[in-house]
Amino acid sequence: MDNSVGKAQNLKKRYYVDKPGTEIKKQNRLIWAKARSVMEAGNYKYRKYGEKVRIKWSLFGLLIRIFGVLLKLTPFFKKGFANAQNIVLNKVDLYFDDLPAGFEGYTILHMTDLHLDSLPEMDKKICEKIDGLKVDLCVLTGDYRVGTRGGFKKILDMLHQIVPCIQQRDGIMAVLGNHDTCAMVEPFEMAGITMLVNETIDIDRGGSRISVTGLDDPYYYYGEQSLQALKESPEGFKIALVHAPSLFDLAADNGYSLYLTGHTHGGQICLPGGIPVIRHLRYGKKYYRGVWHYAEMTGYTGQGVGVVGIPVRFNTQSEITLLRLHRKK
C-alpha cells in the first residue's frame, strides 16, 4: 500500500473507530444518508432558510448545448478548450491572529470541482501538477464528476490514481458537492480519503490543535445537520470545508477562522477583467473567486480543477491551490 493512502486510512481509524462516540456518528451518518438519498431521488434543491426548489435543468441544459455547438464553429472553442486543460498551481499565503504557534507555515493543498470526467486524462494532469509537492494536509471540496446522476466508477478509478500522488502528512479530507451522491462516501473512504459528513476532526501539532469541519453541499442538499455541526465544533482555530460559499455567515457566526470552498469555477466563462457571466450562487455572490473576508473569517474560493457544461474556460484558470497559513506578527 502506498504511504499516503496508509496515513489517510490511519487518520480515518483514529477518528471514526477509536474516538469515543463512534456509534453516535454512525447513527448520524445513517440518518444523513437516508435524508440525502430522498433529496437526490426527489430532484429538489434544498437551500438554507428553508428554501426548497425543483431543479429545472432541461431549458438551461438545452441553451448550454446550443451555445456549445455554436462555439465549436468558431476559433474560440479551441482556445477555450486549451485554457481549460491548462491547470495552474496557485500559491497563496494567509495570515491569522488566532493561528496556534504549532501550525505556523502549515500547508494545505486545496482542490475543488475536479469533474474528473470533464477533460481527457484529468488524473494524469493532476498528478503531474502536484508531482514532488509535499504538504501537511490535502482537502477536496466536492464535485468529482460532471453529471449529477448515474454511476461514478470511471471517476473512482481516476481517484485511485490521484490519491497515491498526494504527499501529505495529516491525510486527505473531503466533502461532497451538488454533483455527487451519498453513495460515494464509502468507496471514497476505501480509497484512502477521510470523508467529513457534517463532522469535525482535530489535528494536533506540537501541543497545538486546529479543527476541520466538513459539511454536506449547501447548494442542493442543505440540512439542519450542517448547522448543528458548526454549532457543536470546539473552540479554537477552525477550518470549514464546504462545497459552496453559501454558508459563509453561519460559519463566521460560529467562530470559524478559514472557509475553503469552490462550486463557482470562478465563473468558468468570464468577460474580460474576469467578470463572470454565471456564478451559480444565491448567497455570497461576491465570494465567487479567490481570497475574501467576512467579519473575522477568511475565505478562499477555488476556481476548480475541471469544468462543467462546455469544456472551455475564458478569463479564468483551472486551479489547484497551495495554501500556507501564518500567524500575524
Image (cartoon, rainbow, N blue to C red):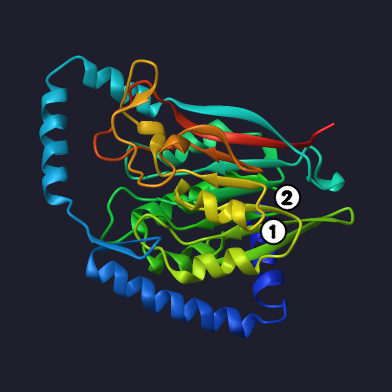
State the residue lying farthest toward the right: 207
Amino acid type indicated by mark 2: Arg
Amino acid type indicated by mark 1: Lys
The quadrant of the image that shows the C terminus is top right
Residue 123: x %, y % from top left? 45, 42
Q: Is residue 197 visible?
A: no
- State which quadrant residue 84 falls in: top left
The quadrant of the image that shows the N terminus is bottom right
Numbered mark located on residue 7 in the image: 1
Local SS, label 1: helix
- Front in this rendered view, residue 80 or 47: 47
Residue placed at 55% from the left, 28% from the top? Answer: 89
Residue placed at 45% from the left, 50% from the top? Answer: 246
Residue placed at 58% from the left, 67% from the top? Answer: 229
Side of 209 where 74 appears, left or right:
left
**Would you name the residue on which mark 2 appears?**
169
Counting the numbered discs, the total is 2
Residue placed at 67% from the left, 60% from the top? Answer: 6
Residue 72: x %, y % from top left? 15, 24
- Front in this rendered view, residue 239 or 257: 257
Quote the CA–CA distance across marks 2 and 1: 7 Å
Q: Residues within 10 Å of mark 2 (few under 14, many from 20)?
A: some
- Mark 2 in CB contact with mark 1 (< 8 angstroms): yes
